[in-house]
Image (cartoon, grey):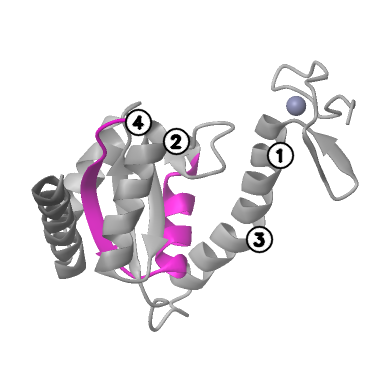
Amino acid sequence: MDKSCTALNVDGSSCLQRVEKTTGPLALCEAHRASVWNYYREVFRDRLIAKMEEKGCIKKHTFGITYFIQLPNGNIKIGYVHTPENLASRMQELFNEHGGRVKLLATAYGGESMEALMHFKFKHLKVRGSWGEQFSPTNELVEYTQELGHVPGGIQAMTILRKRIEGFHAKS
Ligand SMILES: [Zn+2]
């Protein structure tokens, strides 16, 4: 496909980057596809969950563990998984994807609804073009993770990962 991105850059200029894949009726480059996805998730999911939390409507969070993982580029990824095993696998995936050390900074109780709250809380730190998962490692965010610490599932995930790595070295 030979199309150029129809979105506008932050400075208001036309993007015109090559388009690999269309998003419904929109011709957008990868970075603009990510920013459209972020925009709608922030408006429709994160803001709604934050309002519900504010009004005290959330009795219980959705099932899972929300994690804060520091990537080799320094940015902090905030996401969620269902089990400690999934978290160990996520760390391995991120290691492979980003080609370097990843660090589990903190974990919290709650799945997608907690992830949405955290994404909303730190939305001003979101890294552009990162599909909404990466946040700038400012003091505010780093200190928050230090205060948060780990739920038992987070500690378990690190133990599982350590055992997997030891098993891998024992086999090779
Ligand atoms: Zn673009």
Q: CA distance from mark 2 to mark 4?
A: 23 Å
Q: Nearer the viewer, residue 64 or 159?
A: 159
**Contact (Cβ within 8 Å) of mark 3 with mark 4:** no
Residue denoted by label 2: 125
The answer to whether 83 is drawn above or below residue 104 in the figure is below
- Which amino acid lies under the numbered mark 4 shown in the image of this protein? Gly
Helix, strand or loop at mark 3: helix
Q: Which residues are magenta?
A: 99-123
Q: Amino acid at mark 2?
A: Leu
Q: Quadrant of residue 122?
A: top left
Q: Earlier in the sequence, mark 3 or mark 4?
A: 3
Q: Which residue is mark 4?
A: 99
Whether label 2 touches label 3, CB < 8 Å: no
User: Can you say which quadrant of the picture contains the N terminus?
Assistant: top right
Sequence-wise, the earlier of marks 1 and 3 is 1
Mark 2 burial class by Cα count in 10 Å: few <14, some 14-19, many 20+: some
Q: Three-letter amino acid code at disc 1?
A: Arg
Q: CA separation, marks 2 and 3?
A: 19 Å
Q: Tell which circle, 2 or 4, labels the residue nearer the N-terminal end.
A: 4
Q: Which secondary structure lies at badge 1?
A: helix
